[in-house]
Amino acid sequence: MATEIVDIRQFDAGDFAALLAAESEAWRANLHWDYSASARLIAACLNERRLTGYALIDERQIGGYSFFLYEAEKALIGDLFVEPGREACARLLLEHVLETLMATPGILRIEAQLPHFRAEELEPAFLPRRFKSYLRKFMLLPLTPSRAHRSVPLPRPTPNAVTTERLADAFISERWERKFDRQAASLLYHTYRDHVDAVINDQYSSAAGAARLIENIVQMRGCGEFIEPASLVVIHDATRKLAGVLALTAVRPITAHIPQIAVVPEFQGAGLGSFMLKSAFEELQRQGFQEVSLTVTDVNRGAVRLYERLGFETFHTFGAFVWNRP
């Protein structure tokens, strides 16, 4: 029987059970991530016919899938996965998705970050369609005592109060609480709007988009369970404005993840990023985490060098792809 590409809405979640289990294992083994909650959400959306995309069918078995979302004039490829040994079929599936999206009236922009594949595996589908390609790195730091920088002081949080600490007599660090969400979104917008990450993800290019990013991390658990005791904001004491933010999430019991770190341009170079990271490492150790991961765009060389100095090592690379209608 020939390989077929079929509308994903023709199937129930049960038909995808084996594939979702294989994807969860790939996230665990390759990316140090517990994907079970996301797999359950995808299964629920499949049952309710709320996902738009395609399934790869071979000998009556589902061997892969991809789904996509529409956000006004933008389309986002949410996932692309094929069962182990079928990687060569991923491009066939992706071609159908891209043809659909680029032919959809009113779509002016398409974004995709597909971590199961190296950039070079998917570029033959993207580049001929004039997508821009950006290399992204998955980096990991083991939280051993020597690498968690135990010499950096961090006040222990108390149950009913926010602990503060003076930083070089000019800054105060505080635990990230929900009251900081709006200021944090504003900081992201002003820090990233001309940054390469705003080219990859246009939510950084607007205040409303940055607010959605914060909501997704802190409230919607889009990057794992938000770890409030380890997440920090840094305040410039003289102006009371946020100078930096660091969000931490738990993506499995032993692995924390950094979905967001930012320092406003006027305070970059003051060591705030290093301070926040080192402080967070100590708190994560106290909570029993054994490692922390992050993703970074390769051309953001300053950030890459900082992470490497702190002991992070790249363990996986993937591509971010962006298309804007001429």
Image (spheres, helix red, strand yellow):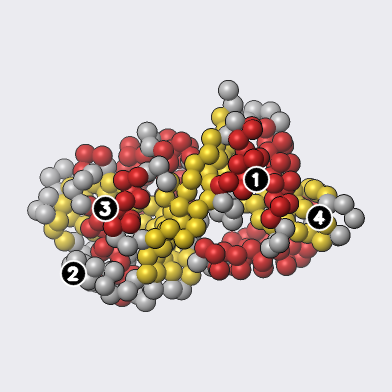
Under tag 3, what secondary structure?
helix
> Which residue in the structure is indicated by mark 1?
68
* Identity, as a three-letter code, of the amino acid under mark 1: Phe
Q: Residue furthest right?
A: 1
Under tag 1, what secondary structure?
strand
> Crowding at label 4, few (<14), some or many (≥20) Cα neighbours within 10 Å?
some
Residue in the picture at 18% in, 69% down:
151
Name the one closer to the observer, 300 or 12.
300
Residue in the picture at 64% in, 40% down:
124
Residue 109 in view here: no
* Identity, as a three-letter code, of the amino acid under mark 4: Ile
* Identity, as a three-letter code, of the amino acid under mark 2: Ser
Contact check, label 1 and label 4, Cβ < 8 Å: no
> Which residue in the structure is indicated by mark 3?
273
> Which residue in the structure is indicated by mark 4?
57
Q: Earlier in the sequence, mark 1 or mark 3?
A: 1
